[in-house]
Amino acid sequence: MGVDKQTVLLFAAAAAVRLFLFIAFPSLPDLLTGRVEVSTPITSFKRLQEGLFLYTHNVSPYDGGVFHQAPLLLPIFALLPNVSTHPLPTAIVYIALDLLGAYALVRTAESGESVTSRLYTSPRKHLSWSSAAIGASFLLNPFTIVTCLARSTSAFTNCAILFAIFKATAGHSFHLVLSLAVASYTSLYPILLAPPLLILCYDRQVRQAAAKPTVPSPVTFAIQHTGGLVAAIGCLLCISYMLTGSWEFIGSTYGFHLLLPDLTPNVGLWWYFFTEMFDSFREFFLAVFWLHMASYVGGLTLRLREQPLFAIVALLGIFAIFLPYPSVSETAVFVGCLSLYSHVFPLMRYAFLSSTVLLYATFFGPAFYHLWIYAGSGNANFFYAITLVWSLALIMILGDSLFAVLRDEWEAERPDMVGKEVRQI
Amino acid sequence: MLFFSILLLLGASILSSAEHTSNWAVLVSTSRFWFNYRHLANVLSLYRTVKRLGIPDSQIILMLPDDMACNPRNVFPGTVYNNADRALDLYGDNIEVDYRGYEVTVENFIRLLTDRFGDDVPRSKRLLTDDRSNILIYMTGHGGNEFLKFQDAEEISAFDLADAFAQMWEKKRYHEMLFMIDTCQANTMYSKFYSPNIIATGSSEIDESSYSHHADNDVGVAVIDRYTYYNLEFLETQVREQGSKLNLGDLFDSYDEEQIHSRPGFRYDLFEGGAEAARARKVMDFFGNVQNVEVQGEADAASWNATSWKEELQALQNLVEEAQKRHNASAPGPEHSRAAADGASVTFRGLNHGVAAKVQVENTWSKQVMGATALLGCAAVWMLGSYFDTAK
Amino acid sequence: MSGLGSALLRLRKDDRILHLAPLISSICVVFGILWLLLLPLDEYSRNTYISENALLPGQVHTYFGGSEHNVFRAFRQEVAALGEVSEAERSAKLEELLLSSGLKVARQRYHYPGVDGSSGENVYAILQAPRGDATEAIVLIGAWTNTDEILNQSGVALVLTLARYFKRWSLWSKDVIFLISGDSTAGPQAWVDAYHDAHDHRYVESLTLKSGALQGAIAVDYPAGPWGHRFDKLHIVYDGVNGQLPNLDLINTAVSVSTGQMGVNVAFQHMWSHEDRYKDRLSTMLRGMVRQGLGHASGPHSAFMPYHVDAITFQTVGDGWHDEMSLGRTLESMFRSLNNLLEHLHQSFFFYLLMAPKRFVSIGTYLPSAMAVAGSFTVMSFALWVKSGRIQQDETESKNPVSQSEKPPAEKTSRPMKIDPKDPRSVPGTRNGTRKIFSPLIVLVAIHGLGLVPLYLFNSLEPQTLSSAFQLFTVITLPLPIIVAFIVAKIDPAPLQTLYIFHSVSLLAHGMALSALATLNFSLSLFVGCITSPLSFLRPLPRHALVAGCALTFWMVLSPMTVLLAGAWMWNAEIGGPQGIQGLLQQAAFGWKVHGLWTPVVVWLVWWPAWCVGGVVSASSMFLPA
């Protein structure tokens, strides 16, 4: 297995912290499930309970217009006892998900992919953090803990994404395809991670191939894996069809992501925009927003061909900012994966500033939400302003880390520029 | 012969200089809520005035967006007063409100003016004017620079109003029009008119507010606006009977800026003959319902003879018979309605599609077994995958 | 744009930033305080005005008079007779009186455990508007005892009279609820909580009778005895729980009706004489800020604020010639104005500081002062962060003196630099390598977590033990930072850098908490910010143990515990509050349990940890090697 004592200690501490919070503050999970920064209409645990109730009572779970999560979650949660009387098993499931995700992240860190990819080796590889520290940046991250406590179903997506990354760095195609299929099945957006993940897996397989003939050709590799992905997703969709008895779940789940019918406030940028949208422009702007988010995939994958893992990390940051229903869980997984690149942190120019802005936005958000909804003395503009600051902070972090990685690459070819101030033009 | 008679009528209309044959009034209040009591009092005062001077209810369109008389805050339920002495209850028991509550919208107002209605709108809600009708249009509420607020939710702009009047002129829906408006910055509202034969007057200039006159301390609100108050004073004290010969010039000259606390404005340039002709029009031409009777004079006696009259009558009768035949031929049969009833039953397949499903707690074991199967299946596939991956 | 960015980044390397930052920080603090002192001037404050057109204050005749006076006197005698009977009898009698006026009546019991004097019974009656639709309601409150624990005889009598009087009018568009609460603080809170179904079922009974959404509430405090007492002014109390204030329009209406229509003068914030001079305005504003900062309930109206129901209390003060009929007419006019409303008051300000009955400043004008004070911490935090990076370089140099002579200036060489794993200076990008932030962060989180201990303790201990618990706590926590400083100095490999990072992150969190707090409770944020502003100037100075000693003494004076003791002493001396720290802590516990007061949270989880960190930083001077 390859996990060392430090990592085991970390996992135990993280599980202990989460268990403690679950048990010592029994009203905290419900409080967090109601917070808009943590629970969105597509990940809320309350909605999952609603869907579960309908499912166990012989009614289509998508009938109420409340439940918008993947159908396969329902039989899994049907196995667990009623959460209001026995909250512990559900808590343990979510803690396990967090730990699994962290395990995948730790193994990814150990593979050294972030410092040494097939085509590039960073001159700073010795500065990278230990895998326990990288795991800690995900497990002990307050955003992750809050997501776990709120029992948001994005924990499933996060775990699947982390496993997909891990399997890609290990070169295990089958598992990669399965993880990515599960991630895309639960939340639509991880499908956009397919190109860099496939490149990563291909690189690893090339490295692992003992001799030339066994090296797969890129085209066949791509076709095989894309086909496998399509088949896996297709299987999952068929199983869902059999579970719910019709194809209507596609409209209620993926259609919901694409068409944004629910404009509940969240930490993203879409909801406010679309409250003011005239109906005739709605479809146009929906298409523009989705295309905008998808357009980063091509550019980042091509430019960061030599470090596909960073392309994935950057895309996770893009998703945390530009998803239709983002929450702090996407930020959690982004920050966790970003620590894989800790060796370029010294090259970041304003890390302290962007972390400060992020921290400020985290505190001001609930304050302004309170002023808007409960005190009645503010309005939606207050809260939206803070979400803009939050997005700005994430963009700053993303941009700065991208700069650091590119500069690292550049210094590998121009070692004389090490330590010199550069001006970006 | 028909053609000849038409020519005759045309000639007569050209010869008779600008006489109107009907009077209509459109009285619009655009604000709701209790503290805008005075706007409804304004309109109701004008309503009483034009009724007193002879315009019948069938020729008055009254638009009241809120019900002040039955508002729970009204100390005197069922009444609306425009004066603190409460001598006259404007609401009374004989008023006919044509557009009430939320029916008073910009769309309905413009449709009313231009008569763009479906066939189902009743006559009481339509402005059935022709090219010989004089119309008094009175509007009051909250306004601004080239706009008037309707019901706190929408606005009508001066351009929209001007276009509506232009359409009225094109469709020959008025002979002459008197447009009065009592709001803040009222004069801007008529600044964009471009169709002929409109006399316009407003209560205040641009960047000027119009003020209320006084409040009733038991009703608790202001009960009348200044501009309307002084208009009413003139009309009540000076225009006492239907034969009054006072003209608009007298009315306009009675405005005292010191008392109105704003500068009323007038617009005569659209009127044929300019300010002189406009001011010479009688007040009763717009506020009352008096028509001059036209006697067919000797001048036309030569071309008028019994034969042509009989022929015209015959032509008319033919027209009527033709129309009746056409009507009988095209009446649809009663079979159409039956066809729609078939095909109503739609069969539903699949789980719970559109049919109300009975909520019952099914044996949850089946769900749990499915869940366990799903989990085990996933685990099995994962194991299979690891076999494939590590076998490479 | 990029030129500006890189210029800014070059600035970061400049040493002058480190000398400039304390200056900027102190300027911010001074600016914040001075700005506050400028507000009462005419150029910065504004006259009040009615924003909501629907209110129409003072435009109705009030007819409360004549025979109603006799009815009032009768009710007052009844109320006086109820002064000695048991609670059950009293409630029964009040219920009977209200029923005889033709209203629907109900009762509610409440009992907050472990808190002195917070159990009782509320009696309330609902006048259903004959022509209204019962979707909204306004409340008239007469608490049985006022905030000074005196029987509110005339107040309750007035409520009963007005109940009978209002029943005769048919012009109510909203239901009117008449509440006679058991006391002035816990009773209304229990009632409002139960009205909105947000109450704790173990302590507070649910309401059997309810009406529509509450739009406004007015409380009357008129403790005159059975023979009456003519008053001089009306004292309008408007502070709510946690510093939340009602919409300014409500206060403006009250002032307009009292002074304009009724000719009764008003007073705010216990300012009995106010001549609209700078001194009076400043005094009113500061007193208002103190009340807002403390956030306690100052009357029956305070409990309504968190539910977005605008509420005020009329208190009669002084000796004059206005009598209960003036007060009754004032209330009648106020209720007629509230009756005119169509929606919640929202046009006017929710955040303001009143300086005189007709002068105020709004949040846009006064917020810069709190933000400046909070910003001073952030500025220092940045400077300390930058300095902590420089520190490491010095520290590693002092540990590897060999490399001194071979130090190649990083910017001037033309040789390709090889990155040597052992030499942190050879790592490019910064002069210093990466900072170790894990341990400072953990210690900071631990200290903030420790703040939960006094918060829990002082809110749950028995009142008698509070004083000794406080003393014990002070004795334990004073040496705590010194111990932590000792441990850090001895164990940490790079203690100076760790301390700088520690201080930087603590100041950052402190500034952030204060700026967020400023939007919710401006006064508390400003007060805590001013008191803790010296903390940002503390430094670990390795060679000056004497200076460190002085700093530590100063630091002890500024502790939350000292301030609390001083506050308790002043409260007792000036206003005659309960003795010592026990009374203060009891009130805080009461506020926490009954009203959900946040001030203890701010004191123990924001102020106290920041103060501890300041202590660690100053004390470390004694232990760091020279």
Image (cartoon, coloured by chain):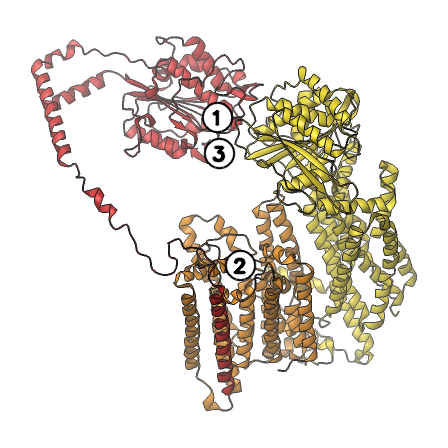
Chain colours: A orange, B red, C yellow
Q: Disc 2: which chain? A: A
Q: Which residue is mark 2?
A: A49
Residue B277 picture quarter: top left
- Do badges 1 and 3 share one subunit? yes
Q: Quadrant of the N terminus of chain B?
A: top left
Residue type at the position of mark 3: Asp
> Which residue is located at x 77 percent, y 80 percent?
C406
- Do badges 2 and 3 share one subunit? no
Give the x, y percent position of residue C3.
Answer: 61, 61
For the residue pair C244 and A268, the one nearer the viewer reads as: C244
Determine whether the residue tagged by mark 1 lies in a helix, strand or loop.
Answer: loop
Residue B183, label in figure: 1
Q: Which residue is mark 3?
A: B152
Q: Nearer the viewer, mark 1 or mark 3?
A: 3
Determine whether the residue tagged by mark 3 lies in a helix, strand or loop.
Answer: loop
Q: Is residue B304 above or below residue C433?
A: above
Q: Is residue B191 visible?
A: yes
Give the x, y percent position of residue C577.
Answer: 84, 39
Q: Is residue C558 above or below residue B111?
A: below
**Could you tell whether B49 is left or right of C553 in the image?**
left
- Do badges 1 and 2 share one subunit? no
Q: Residues within 10 Å of mark 3 (few under 14, many from 20)?
A: few
> Which residue is located at x 78 percent, y 64 percent?
C500
